[in-house]
Image: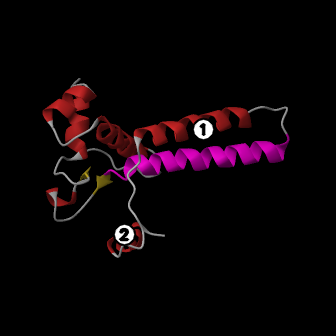
Amino acid sequence: MPLPQLDNLVRARQLKAEPGAQAEIDGLLRSGNARLTDAGKAMLSHESRFDLAYNAAHALSLAALRWLHRIAADPNICHGKPCVKGTRIMVAVILDNLAEGVTAEQIVAEYPPLTLEDVRAAIAYAAALAREEELVPLR
């Protein structure tokens, strides 16, 4: 279901928005990575290996969605640039700070609405963009 439809269900109170807790994300990552490791074991049947790889992909995708749930782009906020949801702090500001050597902890201290999970979400968002098939050259 597309994101706008999900947002409509949240507004109509037919679906509860649940931000991911870091412990949940960490558990999904551990589970996904363990299953992916097991899927590489040649002694298992092809069916078992496929099942493990499929479940690994599912767990890792859920972890990514939980992280990315923290990022929003609204045409009425910061000219539609991706921001940490509920703030006017652009993902680009977080990434620029990281590129300059500022630590995640320092960014959180400098921008009080942010959490470490928000900084991780900005990094995950940038990584997802970098994986796109068609990259646009920098100007």
Label 1 secondary element: helix
Label 2 secondary element: helix
Q: Tell me if 35 is positioned left or right of 122 in this view.
A: right
Q: Tell me if 41 is positioned left or right of 31 in this view.
A: right
Residue 49 shown in magenta: yes
Position of residue 41 relative to residue 101, above or below, is below
**Residue at 21%, 60% in the rendered image:** 80
In the rendering, at what x and y percent does residue 37 appear?
67, 32
Dot 2 or dot 1, earlier in sequence: 2
Going by the numbered disc 2, the residue's amino acid type is: Val
Q: State the residue lying farthest toward the bottom.
A: 12
Q: Residue beneath label 1, please?
A: 31
Residue count near mark 1 (Cα–Cα under 10 Å), binned few <14, some 14–19, many ≥20: some
Report whether residue 132 is seen.
no
Could you tell me which quadrant the C terminus lies in?
top left
Mark 2–mark 1 distance (CA, rounded to whole Å): 28 Å
In the rendering, at what x and y percent does residue 97 appear?
20, 32
Question: Principal SS element in the magenta part?
Answer: helix
In the rendering, at what x and y percent does residue 54 appear?
67, 49
Q: Residue beneath label 2, please?
A: 10
Q: Tell me if 30 is positioned left or right of 92 in this view.
A: right
The residue closer to the viewer here, 40 or 26, is: 26
Going by the numbered disc 1, the residue's amino acid type is: Ser
Report whether residue 118 is seen.
yes
Q: Tell me if 119 is positioned left or right of 102 in this view.
A: right
Position of residue 89 relative to residue 106, above or below, is below
Give the residues drawn in magenta, as a range: 45-70
Position of residue 72 relative to residue 122, above or below, is below
Q: Which mark is residue 64?
A: none
Residue count near mark 2 (Cα–Cα under 10 Å), binned few <14, some 14–19, many ≥20: some
The residue closer to the viewer here, 67 or 76, is: 67
